[in-house]
Image (tube, rainbow, N blue to C red):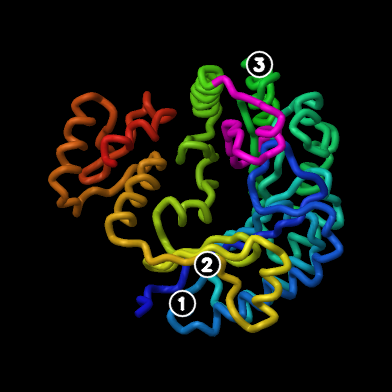
Amino acid sequence: MVPRPPSPAALYIHIPFCHARCGYCDFVTFTGKEDGIPAYVDAVCEEIALHAARPWLGLEPFDTIFFGGGTPSVLEPEHIQTILSTVRERFEVSPEPEITLEANPESVSAEKAAGWKRAGVNRLSLGLQAFDDTLLKAMGRLHTIDGFLKAYDFLRQAGFQNVSFDLIYGFPDQSLDSWQNTVDSALRLKPEHLSLYSLLVEAHTPFALAGVTVDNDLQGAMYEWARKFLEEKGLSQYEISNFARPGYGCRHNMVYWRQQNYLGVGTGAVGCVGDLRWTNQKSLETYQKDLSAGRLPWHSSEHIDSKSRRFERLMLGLRLREGLDWTDERDESWLQVRSELSKKGWLEQVESGRWRVAESLVGMTNQVLLPFL
């Protein structure tokens, strides 16, 4: 029998449409299919309604809603409004939710920015990636620095007071000096939040097919420099890849890292409620066919056993600088490992019962986790 945990605290909505595919992209995205957006919005609303009809989800309020992609900013404000209205009709939403929309600069206009704000979006995640036109072109990005600056200005003029930039480091033609200029130039614009991601060359991506490789040592140097620089400039690191001014950490992503419930809708979206986790169909056609037949568009689902859930809690919790609460841990082998790692200076106690990866080893968190496997 499926357990009846509280309703998810977060809602993720996947928008798979893009005008072009970036060389590093490994997400569920489609190019040249923008004429299917209206039908897709209808399908997403139908999926939301189907979930709401499942009593085991419960009806506790969503505290965060996140439009991810793909490129959600290809949607018009009325599309966002339609989806959010459906969410509010079918589920309870907290009085002051965090509602994030990911955006690429080339698809942001003054009219769209104002429309998204009216629809209820209150946080924008803008894909800058690099402050270098030559590098942006090599990535397959469609915007220039000038285009990014105009998009950012549109967002501020529309009244957005919570804006995050995404940056990627470790490209083959990117020097440490170039990376430092990107971070410094981005910071001068005074965003509330920065996400820094190392370049990963995933199988089957354009970069992988082109034989692109990364310099791990250079990536490590870029990461450690950025950590120190951002801390000095007032952006605190609260998770491995994320930095924010006080009060501007991403509430939605904290749901994942704290292993709380979240509902995922849209092609390829993942949801996890209690010990049940599912992944949606990755094909637009199959996704919409399932919904037309009145069934949830699940490609796969699993019940997470207690051992796996426990390790995932460790893995996710140690990504956070707030640390992981180990007050109730009873596994003697894990306690022994923790004690040994503490003696080696790999783990440090933040407060009673809460532990985190040592400050000097944040960039090596995965290696710290290995002894627990």
Tell me the residue at 63%/81% (across/down): 89
Please name the amino acid that badge 2 sits on: Leu
- Tell me, yes or no, if residue 372 can be seen here: yes
- 162 vs 6, left or right, is right
As measured in the structure, the alpha-carbon distance from the residue carrying label 3 to the one carrying label 2 is: 40 Å
- 370 vs 193, left or right, is left
Please name the amino acid that badge 3 sits on: Ser
Q: Main secondary structure of the magenta part?
A: loop
Residue at disc 3, secondary structure: loop
Q: Earlier in the sequence, mark 3 or mark 2?
A: 3
Which residue is label 1 attached to?
Answer: 57
Residue at disc 2, secondary structure: strand
As measured in the structure, the alpha-carbon distance from the residue carrying label 3 to the one carrying label 1 is: 49 Å
Counting from the top left corner in percent of width and height, residue 323 is at 34, 42
Q: Earlier in the sequence, mark 2 or mark 1?
A: 1
Residue count near mark 2 (Cα–Cα under 10 Å), binned few <14, some 14–19, many ≥20 = many
Q: Earlier in the sequence, mark 3 or mark 1?
A: 1
When asked about the image quadrant of residue 340, the answer is top left
Counting from the top left corner in percent of width and height, residue 320 is at 40, 42
Which residue is label 2 attached to?
Answer: 263
- Tell me, yes or no, if residue 262 can be seen here: no
Quadrant including the N terminus: bottom left
